[in-house]
Image (cartoon, rainbow, N blue to C red):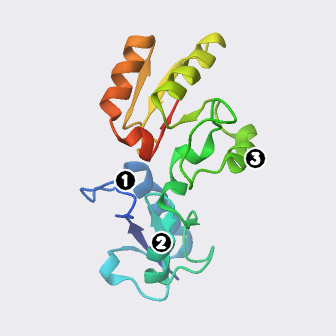
Amino acid sequence: MKNVVLLNNPVLEYRPDGSVPVNIRAVATRIAGVLGGDIRTAEQADHETYYVPFAAVHKPLADQKGITGAGDVYGGVVREPQHADKAILHELPTQDAAHPEWYSPHFARAVGEVVLPGFTTFTREDTALAFEHMQTKELSVRFKDPSNTGGLGQRLVRDRKELSDAITDHGSKLTEAGVVL
């Protein structure tokens, strides 16, 4: 028997208010039933705890909670907080596009066959280029803040004006965290 603890990862700032996404609570409830345990608070965690995080767990938090492998967590553990975001999943619009050190073009290429079509960008110019690529393929384009989940932080962009507005609203996050189209 293992008890389940819902784990908000404050480094990733997915849910700064601490609220639990409905889908995560449902997963935790199902896992608790399979493991024969209950859902507990973080204060009630012990060595028999199974963690259900809101997103991938950042390595320092995993170390703090004693998460050492698959038997301890639903999901994964990442070295860099940004590796838990959507930005890591999509390729850049060009091979020489600007990107931060934590972004891995190799990883994005490796998972390209199992993710929805799209691009990750870190500059206004590359975002416009990615938008044009998608428009040429007659794809609907959603502008997504890569660190949000559950449909939050995204909007449909149908033309260059809406794209420009979305980029402006995203602000400095564009160069720091990127955007997913």
Determine which residue is flagged by label 3: 110
Tally the numbered discs.
3
Residue sitting at the far bottom: 47
What amino acid is found at the position of numbered circle 1 in the picture?
Tyr
Determine which residue is flagged by label 1: 14
What amino acid is found at the position of numbered circle 3 in the picture?
Ala
> Is 117 rendered above or below residue 136?
below
Residue plotted at (75% across, 38% down): 113
Whether residue 59 is visible here, answered yes or no, is: yes
Determine which residue is flagged by label 2: 51
Give the spatial CA distance, label 2 vs label 1. Answer: 16 Å
Percent across and percent down for residue 79 are: 55, 67
Which SS class for mark 1?
A: loop
Give the spatial CA distance, label 1 vs label 3. Answer: 26 Å
Q: Residues within 10 Å of mark 2 (few under 14, many from 20)?
A: many
Percent across and percent down for residue 84 are: 52, 55
